[in-house]
Image: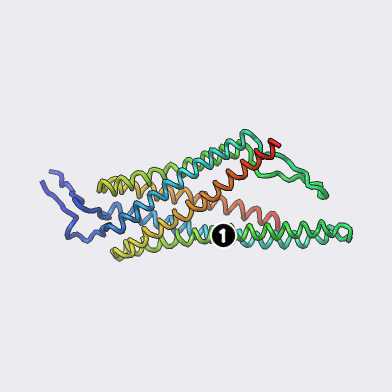
Amino acid sequence: MEQQNSDLFSDEIKIDETGKNHILGLASWAMLIVIVSVLGYVLDLLSSITGRNNEAVQSEGFGVYFKTGGNSIGGAILSLLIGLLINFFLFRFARQSRSGITALNQDELNRSFRNLKIYFIIVSILMIIVSLIVLIGVFAIL
Amino acid sequence: MEPTQNTSLFQLNLDANNAFTLRSAASWAKVLAILGLIFGIILIAVGFLVQNAIQNNAYGRFEDMEYRSNANILENMGTAGMVVYIFFGVLVIIGSIFALSFGNKISTALRTNDQNTLRSGFGAVRNYFAYWSILMIICLLLMIIGIAAGSGSMGM
């Protein structure tokens, strides 16, 4: 059986101890983002369902109704779905990179980087959509 | 017989497949960073535009001295809005700088096989996630305070 050892003398770039520590720290922060985001979505959904913030307040003198915070249930569900999609890949990245580093598992680390790439792709596409909406809004005001 | 690849016993490498995935992640991070920079600049510009529009409208709408206080309130609201827009624009720009740093450093490291640059690339993406985590924790706390204040005022 032919065996190829790519460890000692190959020109592949290696992930040293500092790099591993950075990746472990990165995985921890990514997991924290997932937890905080999911908590935020749940709170947003709960506050939309209870409808406590969704009151219309009339400001004296202007005769204009201002909505104070709060958003519709539909908006909360939409943001929950999009958020869960993004955070699913971030969660997988955090979990796989941690296990890849601790168990020295190359395949797991490969899969974690693939999830990081998908995360950046989805966030970039969302950023393009949001920027376009803001630009359209600005042109509408002008 | 199929050749088997023993990647590493005691350390992890960035093999061709891994390097390709990491390079495309870095490219998308650069795209995100550039979009973020543009978005941040748009937010700051919108802040100035809105403040300018409100200022121009305020005194036109309330020409009477009797309603001048309303114009002042509108102007103050415009200024507050501008500060909020600029604040969020700056936050987005700072986050984008971290993402850009990650994208540039990882691309350079993989091109030149430079260990130090790879390390600092991973450090940059760690800082990117740390930055957004802290901001999100602050937002979550503000949200909880808002909900608590809202339910407190409802109970009164």
The quadrant of the picture occupied by the N terminus of chain B is top left
- The chosen color scheme is rainbow
Relative placement, left or right, of A66 versus B94 is right
Give whichever of A13, A60 is nearer the camera.
Answer: A60
Q: Which chain contains the residue that carries disc 1?
A: B
| Figure disc tally | 1
Determine the residue positioned at 58% across, 62% down: B41
Residue A59: x and y, percent? 78, 47
Determine the residue positioned at 39% across, 57% down: B26
Give whichever of A1, A70 is nearer the camera.
Answer: A70
What residue is pinned by disc 1? B40
Relative placement, left or right, of B17 versus B147 is left
Quadrant housing residue B52: bottom right
Quadrant housing residue B75: bottom right
Find numbered disc 1 in the image and state the secondary structure of the residue it sits on: helix
Residue B77: x and y, percent? 72, 56
Q: Residue furthest left?
A: A1
